[in-house]
Amino acid sequence: MRTEEITEGSRFSAAMRFELLVGVLNAIGTHQNPQDLFGALVRELHRVVRFDYIGVYIRDENSNTFHRHSVDAETQAAIPPDPELSMEKSDAWWVYQNQQPLITSLEVRDAGFSKFQEILKKKYGIRCVCTLPLTTAHSKVGTLAFASKAPDTYPGEEVHFLSVVAEQIALAFDNALHFDAAQASRSIAEGERTCSTSP
């Protein structure tokens, strides 16, 4: 379901939307690889959330860096990270540091308008961004951003719903990252075992 299909006149009731969310999360939760999980997010979340672009910033604890994944929801084409934009100047960085959702309207350029926001507006036609922390009980996983070409897409009640979405997605990414790490450790252990048994 594309963004334009979820219009104000056809919005689901809150109960129905949460029911749909359960189905979406079940579909997402089957993916144990972070890359596959992100692909599923793009495909599945349109059933319950309005967005034209989606971005996930996942923190790599080993290197203390962020893996950035952004996609145009209509074409499902990946958007490569802009080398001119540092993570520290992005909304995602602020959200990760402060662990609070951030709604950014790109309608009016004010003194606080960053280069990051300017590029979003000029290059992609984005007018509204909702960035949320991806956090579990024991770790700060990263951030999730929904971006829309329509203004005021994410009012207060929508942010509340998206926060619930983000909590569940944080758990899915945390599980996928731990599964990935366990697989890597197993591969290393098997490699060492093979080397030690070789003549």
Image (cartoon, rainbow, N blue to C red):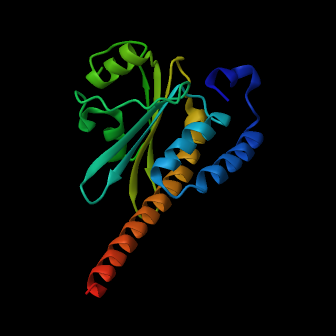
Q: Which residue is most to the front?
A: 199
Instruction: Choose top left, top right, bottom left or bottom right for residue 107.
Output: top left
- The residue lying at 31 percent from left, 15 percent from top is 110
Residue toward you, 160 or 153: 153
Q: Where is residue 91 in the image (x, y as percent from the top left)?
A: 35, 34
Q: Is residue 114 left or right of residue 6?
A: left
Q: In this view, does 170 lie to the left or right of 14?
A: left
- The residue lying at 32 percent from left, 18 percent from top is 118
- The residue lying at 75 percent from left, 33 percent from top is 12
Question: Does residue 199 lie above or below 43 as drawn?
Answer: below
Is residue 136 among the parts visible in the rendering? Answer: no
Instruction: Choose top left, top right, bottom left or bottom right for residue 42.
Output: top right
Which part of the image, by quadrant, shows the C terminus?
bottom left
Q: Where is residue 86 in the image (x, y as percent from the top left)?
A: 23, 34
Which part of the image, by quadrant, shows the N terminus?
top right
Is residue 124 among the parts visible in the rendering? Answer: yes
Q: Is residue 158 left or right of residue 148?
A: right
Residue toward you, 198 or 188: 198
Question: Does residue 111 lie above or below 174 as drawn?
Answer: above
- The residue lying at 34 percent from left, 45 percent from top is 67
Q: Position of residue 121 (x, y in %)?
A: 39, 16
Instruction: Choose top left, top right, bottom left or bottom right for residue 189.
Output: bottom left
